[in-house]
Amino acid sequence: MASVEIRGLRKSYGATDVIKNVSIDVEDGQFVVLVGPSGCGKSTLLRMIAGLESISDGEVRIGGKVVNAVPPKERDIAMVFQNYALYPHMTVAENMGFSLKLKKVPKAEIRAQVERAADILGLAPLLERRPKQLSGGQRQRVAMGRAIVRDPQVFLFDEPLSNLDAKLRVQMRTEIKALHQRLGTTTVYVTHDQIEALTMADKIVLLNDGNVEQMGPPLELYDRPANRFVASFIGSPAMNFFSGTIEDGKFRTRSGALLPLAAMPDAAPGQPLTYGVRPEHFRLDPDGVPVDVAVIEPAGSETQLFGKLGDDDVVGVFRERLTARPGERIAMSPMPEAVHIFDGQTGKRL
Ligand code: ADP
């Protein structure tokens, strides 16, 4: 196992900068998730760690050693891709042991390594099958098995669950996390899915347009987003935002609704601000603000409400079942201690 240190990393294609001065520390044994919208540079960054993309500027260290000029094969990493790239004519066991065979590892040792990985992944009964005789989840496990047998210093995952259906994705997410807890191998995992990032990571790195917007433990990004971009990306349904100003100790939205504050933010009188509140941080409250109900979506364990607060769209998530119907009015209040205030211009947290 090893740490991965990224220092002042840049990548340009011609005049286009796609990675702009990124520095990240992945500690030995840590599970770090690179997340962000499509095109933000996650895969490029991962491929630079793997050695599959050249580095325009900066440094990548694996286990303390600068690897900028080290070819991928010699970096002691194993990568798991979105399309598992299994050899169709080989059995599961042959697929998993192939990299060791290329390294001329003795047959008995390959067999032992493959069996160990198969045990960990529950693949033992499937070792003699070919990929087309496997389900999507089983193929994904074989791809992971292939990485495990190499016993690398670092695992790199590039959107490994994107091809699976929703239910299997949730299951594999738990399996990968359990696998990491068992093996403790340093892992860098790329996804566009904020739920995967929240549930799997020790540390999230949220990228946007080639820059790091925020990095830290998942709940830190959730509870204290550094800016409006982070606040809107992490959490689903997304945080509600209202533009407005502070007036007499309350937040006044553009359309005149008065929302509560637990503390006064450090803002000048009349300064344009954004009030952020997550859908789950509303409660039903007869003394709250009036919301015109547009759609109610019962999901069993919770109910989502979509409506209008003045001119602004609003989404609330409630544990209780709602009897309100579309077209009716309902009164609700943000929980003041859970409110986020951002600078209306820069989007920075205040
Ligand atoms: P992500 O994985 O976050 O979706 P990528 O790392 O694949 O994003 O791409 C980051 C940006 O770099 C995108 O805008 C993409 O169009 C651009 N890009 C990727 N590869 C190349 C290339 N070979 N030439 C030019 N631009 C590229």
Image (cartoon, grey):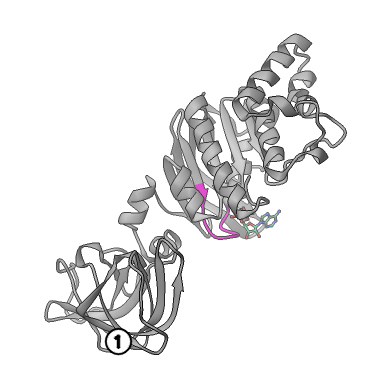
Q: Is residue 237 left or right of residue 38?
A: left
Which is more toward the observer, 272 or 263? Answer: 263
Q: Is residue 285 left or right of residue 279?
A: left
Numbered range of the magenta stretch: 34-41
Which is more toward the observer, 129 or 90? Answer: 129
Magenta stretch: dominant SS?
loop
Up-down: is 132 above or below 103? below
Name the residue located 30 percent from the left edge and 89 percent from the top edge: 255
Q: Is residue 22 within the magenta segment?
A: no
Q: Is residue 270 left or right of residue 304?
A: left
Name the residue located 82 percent from the left edge and 35 percent from the top edge: 87
Residue 331 visible here: yes
Can you say which quadrant of the picture contains the C terminus? Answer: bottom left
Q: Is residue 37 within the magenta segment?
A: yes
Up-down: is 267 above or below 79? below
Which is more toward the observer, 79 or 166? Answer: 166
Q: Is mark 1 within 8 Å of ligand 1?
A: no
Q: Is residue 262 left or right of residue 295?
A: left
- Callout 1 amino acid: Arg
Name the residue located 56 percent from the left edge and 30 percent from the top edge: 154
Report which residue position mark 1 lands on. Answer: 254
Query: How many numbered discs, if any?
Result: 1
Q: Quadrant of ligand 1?
A: bottom right
